[in-house]
Image (cartoon, rainbow, N blue to C red):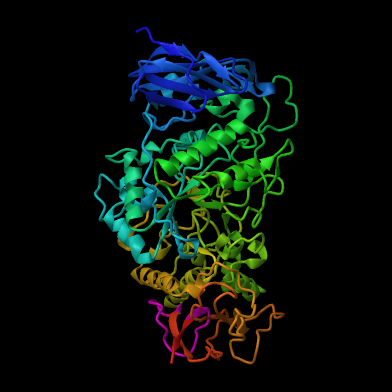
Amino acid sequence: MRRRIGEGRPDRLGLVCDAGGANVAVASETAERVELCLFEGGRETERIPLPERTGFVHHGHVGGIAPGQRYGLRAHGAWAPAEARRFNPAKLLMDPCARAFDGRLRWHEAQRAHAPGRPGAPDRRDSAPWMPKAVALGLEPPVDPEERPRRPWTETVIYEAHVRALTRLHPEVPEAQRGTYEALGHPAVIAHLESLGVTAVELLPVALFMDEPRLTAMGLANHWGYNPAAFFAPEPRYFGPAGAAGLRGAVKALHAAGIETILDVVYNHTAELEEDGPCLSFRGLCDAGHYRHAPEAPPPGGTRAYANLSGCGNALDLSRPMVQRLVTDSLRWWAEVMGVDGFRFDLAPVLAREGEEGGFDVGAGFLDALRQDPTLAGLKLIAEPWDVGPEGYRLGGFPPEFAEWNDRFRDDVRGAWRGDPRGAQRLAGGLLGSAAVFDRDGRPATASVNYVASHDGFTLVDQTTYAERRNHANGEGNRDGHAHEISDPCGPDGLSEDPRVIAARGRRRRALLATVAAAQGTPMLLAGDEIGHTQGGNNNAYCQDDETTWLDWGAADAAMLRFARRAFALRARLPVLRQRRFLHAETRVDGTPEVEWHALSGGGAPDWADPALPGFLLTLRGAAGALGDPAPALIAVNLAAEPVTPELPPAGADFVWRAVLDSEPEDGTPPGEALSGGAVRIHEAVRR
């Protein structure tokens, strides 16, 4: 057919259908020509050069294109890998802004940019037969803003979950939906979240990703999804009967229950990986314009190396306006069209590296763009505050609008309950929101996302069962994952049938979970910890899409679940445990301090100079100057092995203490006056 070709518009990247066809706009700083390639079935039927260029955007309007059309891109230009120019029109490229593809992205040798073993020569094989094709769509309607729960940070309880692992074995979810987006919105799954007091589900990556070639060669798959290939399109391996609409439906169902959805997003690197990796999209469209490169000149005949700030082979350069535009456009799409309520940014320092040296800059353009964007600024923004680049550990270094994963809280809390020297002192700081790290520039106490287990590392059960990682199934000789987990099997390493060991491990798990529930900040619970999920000691199960990571609902620890529900219900009921302001023992208007510390056995303040301090009593009151005056609470912590009967300080005029949660018994109910060794108890103040 003879198509009408117009100049189109450069202001909306990607391909968007309209009444007369489709507008196509593709960003590339250095391409000489970009072609739109149309497909019918598996056959390429047309190649249409985009006729215009405005700045770095190649664009055109192509008549006769309707929703459902399959397409890809090819880019023409110089092959000069030493200059980060890897144009190779033999490679069909994915539209970085496509919102749908017709299948999974799977590795094939024909996807290589350069000839095997010859980095200076392009690979001439056509990759089109082995590439998923983008699917043309029109503009999707935005969600109704009134649908969003908009839960305040002070009410937020995050549940970190994987779409497939959470639901693959759930007995109440229909078989056809298990492991899919639809399952997230199933009434049984939502009822479980509600029973825990969860207010936000944080999903591991759901944007389209690829299994690394080395995993494919080993017969494994990337389970976690931290290997992105397209930023707008939902990953099809989680499609159920409703396809991508299943995710939108799940978000809507969660919203109806008052639960927000936060996406873990990966903008620090892509699935094109290192110099020998596949040519899928960004590398072929404009390698120099998308990635950071090493300053060193390559050897003769070599390729320009990438700056590997992610540990995955490459690093996107978000200091470049077109990359920044691509990323912010994708974030807005997930928020406005899919309805998500926030984002957790994987390896976030990469996104804030500026200049030729690539140093971290708290005023980086991308962070500023998020903070001023009328759509994104009102969402929950969470940073994973480290990468593998120079000075990459930036905990506490992000702008006030961000919360941050607090791995220091994780390590301090685990270490304290294990009995590490000065553990009580570090635990005390964590209970007050890690103010030494976060209390600056007007940041709220909720900036600290507190957790003792996440997808990355031991589960709660495994950190109380294993002393060393057991990652042999990953095929890397047990060298991957954290080499030095802060864990304590409370006896011999591994599984045990000794009732005393089993009891000690249960008590430790409850103490760890109660600490998360009672600490100032934003608590995060790893999916499965509430039902006793184990990964058999695998602390890096990124490539285990099997029973290692799938939650076994049939083997749920009912006692642990009851305790978790009780702990987070208590947090919801006691506002003093979840304050917005940091507490520093300032004097309130009634003359009482915000916080008071006492020794377990009475007699004044704890001996903070004692590296083996066995515990403490912490009285919490409302922050000075804050609105409202919540009733006080008291946290009693006994890190020692022996039980103790705490000498409680006065609760205040007209109040008495009532114990409401104890980590010694399985259900959390306080058993008596004595506080067991290795346990924590929470009291609330009630009127006489």
Residue 635 visible: yes
Q: Is residue 296 above or below residue 188?
A: above
Closer-to-camera residue (189/274): 189
Number of callouts? 0
Closer-to-camera residue (619/379): 379
* Residue drawn at 51 percent across, 19 percent down: 59
Looking at the image, the residue that sits furthest to the top is 2
- Residue 125 in the image: state x and y as whole percent: 50, 16
- Residue 41 in the image: state x and y as whole percent: 33, 19
Q: Is residue 90 above or below residue 586?
A: above
Image side of residue 420 versus residue 98, left or right: right
Closer-to-camera residue (364/683): 364
Instruction: Reply yes or no: does residue 324 show up in magenta.
Output: no
Image side of residue 195 versus residue 263, left or right: left
* Residue drawn at 28 percent across, 46 percent down: 177
- Residue 208 in the image: state x and y as whole percent: 44, 36
Instruction: Reply yes or no: does residue 681 show up in magenta.
Output: yes
Q: What stretch is highlighted in magenta?
A: 662-682
* Residue drawn at 63 percent across, 50 percent down: 386
Q: Indicate the quadrant where residue 78 lies.
A: top right
**Quadrant location, the N terminus:** top left
**Secondary structure, magenta segment, majority class:** loop
**Quadrant location, the C terminus:** bottom left
- Residue 504 in the image: state x and y as whole percent: 47, 75
Residue 448 visible: no
